[in-house]
Image (spheres, grey):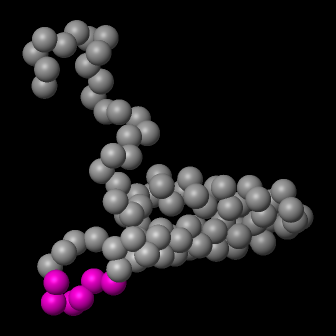
């Protein structure tokens, strides 16, 4: 903690900070943000009933997760099982 800080500049958490996010697979905030963007596009383009909207919400979450995994694989390649590198 910064002992020279003042109550005005001491923030316990930095909202929206994604500095430590590598790929986003474990970050519900990152996945939710992308899924919401996909949902918005779909909901503007098509008219869904309430049951279909529930299904779309799950499908867009899975699509956002798959995009995150694909992006990480494109940047870093697949991990060999014998490697100890964490993703």
Residue 64 % position (x, y):
56, 67
50 w.r.t. 83: above or below: above
Tell me which corner region of the image, top left, top right, bottom left or bottom right, holds residue 27: bottom left
From this viewpoint, which residue is outermost toward the bottom? 81
Q: Which residue range is magenta in the image? A: 78-83
| Residue positioned 35% across, 33% down in the render | 14
How far from the left and from the top, in percent, is residue 6? 22, 9
Query: The N terminus appears in which quarter of the rendering?
Result: top left
Q: Quadrant of the C terminus?
A: bottom left
The one of 19 and 75 positioned closer to us in this rendering: 75
- Residue 37 is left or right of residue 4, and the answer is right
Image location of residue 55, percent across then percent down: 70, 73
At a point 45% along the width and 58% down the height, the residue shown is 28
Magenta-colored stretch includes residue 80: yes
Q: Is residue 69 visible?
A: no
- Taking the image as shown, residue 59 lies to the left or right of residue 6, namely right
Pick whichever, 8 or 83, lies toward us.
83
> Would you say residue 64 sits in the magenta stretch?
no
Tell me if residue 37 can be seen: yes
């Amino acid at each position: 903690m910064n002992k020279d800080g003042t109550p005005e500049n001491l923030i316990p958490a930095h909202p929206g900070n994604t500095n430590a996010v590598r790929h986003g697979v474990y970050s519900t905030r990152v996945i939710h943000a992308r899924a919401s963007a996909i949902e918005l596009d779909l909901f503007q383009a098509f008219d869904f009933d309430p049951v279909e909207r529930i299904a779309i919400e799950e499908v867009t979450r899975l699509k956002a997760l798959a995009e995150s995994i694909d992006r990480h694989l494109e940047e870093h390649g697949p991990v060999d099982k014998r490697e100890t590198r964490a993703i």
